Image (cartoon, grey):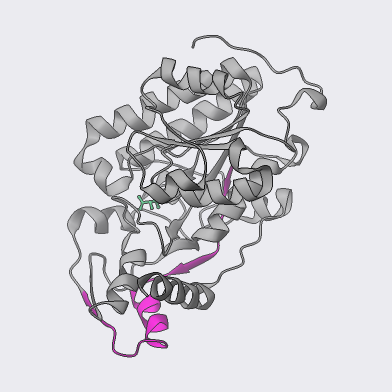
Amino acid sequence: PRQINRWPSNESSEPPTDSPRVLITGGLGQLGVGLAQMLRQQYGKENVILSDIRRPPAEVYNMGPFVYADVLDYKNLRELVVNNRITWLVHYSALLSAVGEANMALARTINITGLHNVLDLALENCLRLFVPSTIGAFGPSSPRDPAPDLCIQRPRTIYGVSKVHAELMGEYLHHKYGLDFRCLRYPGVVSAHTKPGGGTTDYAVQIFHDALSTGHHECYLRSNTRLPMMHISDCHRATVEFMQAPESRLSLRTYNIAAMSFTPEEVAEEIRKHLPHLRVTYNPDTIRQTIADSWPVRFDDSNARQDWGWKPAYGLSEMVTDMLASIREKRT
Ligand code: AKB
């Protein structure tokens, strides 16, 4: 590690929760822009900086501060944190499960070397650090229905391995040096306005676009493949509430969060209540089907509910109604 600044143990020296200055890495993926919007509503536009290595569309520039940041460039990250007086870091930069299997070396570099950089940066600057984990951090030997917070984790993807590594490194640095590390295991996230990139749960977004355009979705998973899923606004709210939770409320540093679990067949049936002509065909692809078969079908999130009051707002029917309305609205 570079420099380690240990937190004094009295609560008053925690990074301020009421007026944080936030940096989000990987901000142009599925989750960054929406999280920035939610944080900006609470803490002010100028206090939340979105970053990525790509050039954002004009509307993102107009929403609030955006900067270039490469998670592999430690000096660049350090400069951003120091110059902008950052106190919270949300580390969204990562390659997802399916694309990671196709680019193992790149996934290892981004997901593991990039993580080491932000861990060092957080230690050096006493940051509150959020790193998302995933249902993909479990594997075929994990309990699958439901998967509890603490159990066997032997994932079979580089994505999963990198996420278990993130969970363990963050927790180690928390226990050894007091790093304020916070990690939520996200289910598949379903969003209308942002596309996921290269995940195994992506069909659950694409099916809505197909339902409203051609009326036909070809699914790369079997019809009965059940996976935990969540509406994006629940995912953002969980993240903000978890970041705001006082340290004294956290009995863990890595929590499962859950909202619903469904199969392609079940979500299609729910969409048909609005669009009866939706046709779904199934053409399972070996890589993604194998990955999905190794993941939990349900998450046990009772610790998150108990410790810091997690409660999802969207079930399957609310999520389907909202997705169809939001995509329709955008198309008109
Ligand atoms: C993926 O499918 O890779 C992600 C995830 C569940 O972490 N959406």
Which of the two residues, 114 or 33, is positioned nearer the viewer here?
33
Q: Is residue 20 above or below residue 228?
A: above
Question: For the magenta stretch, what is the residue range?
Answer: 254-281
In the image, what residue occupies the spot 27% across and 41% down?
100
The quarter of the rendered structure image containing the C terminus is bottom left
Quadrant of residue 92 within the rendered picture: top left
Image-based side of 52 in relation to 246, left or right? left
The x, y position of residue 198, in whole percent, is: 28, 50
Residue drawn at point x = 32 percent, y = 57 percent:
292
Whether residue 32 is visible? no
264 part of magenta stretch: yes
Please report the residue visible at 48 percent of the width from the left and 78 percent of the height from the top.
321
* Quarter of the figure with residue 288: bottom left
110 within the magenta span:
no
Residue in the foreground of this view, choosing between 15 and 84: 84
**Residue lying at the far bottom of the rendered structure:** 276
x, y percentage for residue 237? 61, 54
- Image coordinates of residue 303 in percent, x first then y, are 66, 50
Quick check: 34 above or below 190?
above
Q: In this orientation, which residue lies closer to the viewer: 73 or 64?
A: 64
Is residue 308 visible to the viewer in this orientation of the structure?
Answer: yes
Question: For residue 267, which quarter of the picture?
Answer: bottom left
Closer-to-camera residue (231/260)? 231
Q: Check the image and report above or below for 33 versus 11.
A: below
Q: Is residue 97 left or right of residue 128?
A: left
